[in-house]
Image: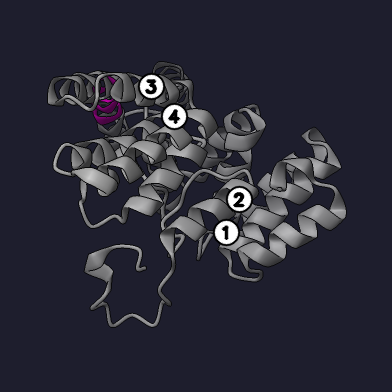
Amino acid sequence: MSILQSDQNNSSPEPRYDLADHFLACARLGRYLTVASRTRFFISDDFQDRSVIHEAAAVAAIYSKDNLVAEAALMPLSGNISHLKGQERDKYERLFHLIEQQTLSEDVRYSAKSLIESRFRESEIREIEAQLGGKISPARERYRLFLGLVKQLMDQKITAKPFIEEFKEFTQDVAGKLDFGIYSFCLDSLFRSLQIPATVKKLLGIEIIAFPALIRRELLSNVLSYPGQTRDLVEFVGSMMDRQLDPEAVIEIDLLKDLKLRRFSMEAISELAIKSGLSSLH
């Protein structure tokens, strides 16, 4: 099984991955879902592409740490059932029972249960899709507004202090309502950009270190693994981590950073985490 049909003719040396296995590996490491190339995080829109294999979508619905992505992964599966008959339909219905029993997301559990009880009526599928869209759209609009402020910062029309205050409000507004992949992409763009002052990046680092552990681990390991990241910022973030975080949390961030730098495989990191007793990495 390939990650996406469009990747099959890719001339890149990047190896093919079984996307379902990749999602399971992310779950074992306590990670948000990434694409197999590890270049970015999956977002809910990715599951509108019909070339995502159903087995992978099912695994994403069960194991994703991002509730919106998990719920989005459920929808292509439900839309497929109405066209099936006999044993094929029975197989998909059993899959939905499994998702309902095993998923980490209460929203996915409720949606799967509703679809099973309604026998996958198209009206019920459309209603759940509308509910999902209602959760995502307002936060996406807020994201676009924030990007306007980023442009002002780049154009030197706003200083660091009011920008950070707006970043705090932006984070508060989108917390739990926006695909983590989009939020991460926003921060990635800020830290990668040469037009964003180093002072702003350091202030963002100070904000991120107070985030919940799972989110903090993903974002800080991103900052430390960017190609071409300045030594000054890497040293600042490393020093901040040493001062404010427990040694175990620092090790977890460093391990994930090494994974992103391709120094270790997911399997090697998982084995090391088990041996080291790092509970949130296995």
Q: Which residue matches tag 1?
A: 225
Task: Note whether residue 201 is visible.
Answer: yes
Q: CA distance from mark 3 to mark 1?
A: 41 Å
Q: CA distance from mark 3 to mark 4?
A: 16 Å
Q: Secondary structure at mark 3?
A: helix
Expressed as whole percent of the image width and height from the top left, the position of residue 82 reads: 16, 36
Q: CA distance from mark 1 to mark 2?
A: 6 Å
State which quadrant residue 241 falls in: top right
State which quadrant residue 35 falls in: bottom left
Task: Note whether residue 155 is visible.
Answer: no
User: What residue sits 78% from the left and 33% below the top?
Assistant: 244
Query: What amino acid type should be assigned to the residue bearing mark 2?
Result: Ser
Contact check, label 1 and label 2, Cβ < 8 Å: yes
Q: CA distance from mark 4 to mark 2?
A: 22 Å
User: What residue sits 52% from the left and 36% below the top?
Assistant: 65
Expressed as whole percent of the image width and height from the top left, the position of residue 123 reads: 13, 20
Q: Earlier in the sequence, mark 3 or mark 1?
A: 3
Q: Main secondary structure of the magenta part?
A: helix
Q: Which residue matches tag 2?
A: 221
Select label 3 or label 1 by which is in front: 3
Disc on res. 67: 4
Q: Earlier in the sequence, mark 3 or mark 4?
A: 4
Closer to us: 56 or 39: 56
Q: Secondary structure at mark 4?
A: helix
User: What residue sits 62% from the left and 43% below the top?
Assistant: 30
Select label 2 or label 3 by which is in front: 3
Q: CA distance from mark 4 to mark 1?
A: 26 Å
State the extent of the magenta-drawn residues as a range: 136-144
Select label 4 or label 1 by which is in front: 4
Query: What amino acid type should be assigned to the residue bearing mark 1?
Result: Ser
Q: Which residue matches tag 3?
A: 113
Disc on res. 3: none
